[in-house]
Amino acid sequence: QVQLEETGGGLVQAGGSLRLSCAASVRTFSTHAMGWFRQAPGKAREFVAAISWSDDSALYADSVKGRFTISRDRAKNTVVYLQMNNVKPEETAVYYCAAAPTISGKYGLWGQGTQVTVSS
């Protein structure tokens, strides 16, 4: 069973930066793409960004384009990062790491989530 573990959440001021990490316990076909989603209190979970392990192609939600960057650790081969810059208070949420066979596929593997709180 593949497990995903997120780290790096915390409290950050608006306009600041934070980097989230997600480590998969093992690389399999089911983790050929990894992504980040977030869920704010009282709101539905939403897509943030995703990256394909095969070609490093990435997808971003419009709301984070130009501010967030998803990347993978080529050396560790099981770690993906989300660099969050110029964060906004409305981006306070639990951020979840997820994995799928393809970048646009069904994300069926999920981490437990890490809380990100942006203070104004």
Image (cartoon, rainbow, N blue to C red):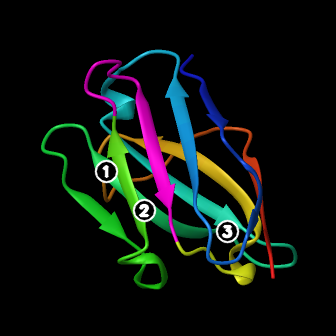
Q: Nearer the viewer, residue 85 or 58?
A: 85
Residue sitting at x 31%, y 50%: 51
In what quadrant of the picture does the C terminus appear?
Answer: bottom right
Above or below for 2 versus 67: above
Q: Which residues are magenta?
A: 73-85
Above or below for 103 versus 53: below
Q: Position of residue 33 (x, y in %)?
A: 33, 43
Q: Position of residue 36 (x, y in %)?
A: 52, 55
In what quadrant of the picture does the N terminus appear?
Answer: top right
Above or below for 24 versus 43: above
Q: Disc 1 marks which residue? A: 51
Choose the circle earlier in sequence order: 3 or 1.
Answer: 3
Q: Nearer the viewer, residue 119 or 102?
A: 119
Q: Are marks 1 and 2 in contact (CB under 8 Å)?
A: yes
* Secondary-structure class at tag 2: strand
Q: CA distance from mark 3 to mark 1?
A: 18 Å
3 vs 2, front mark: 2
Q: CA distance from mark 1 to mark 2?
A: 7 Å
Q: Are marks 3 and 1 in contact (CB under 8 Å)?
A: no
Label number found at residue 45: 3
* Secondary-structure class at tag 1: strand
* Secondary-structure class at tag 3: loop
Residue sitting at x 57%, y 46%: 20
Q: Disc 2 marks which residue? A: 49
Q: Are marks 3 and 2 in contact (CB under 8 Å)?
A: no
Q: CA distance from mark 3 to mark 2?
A: 13 Å
Above or below for 22 versus 56: above
Residue type, label 1: Ile
Disc 2 crowd, CA 10 A, few/some/many (<14, 14-19, 20+): many
3 vs 1, front mark: 1
Residue sitting at x 72%, y 48%: 9
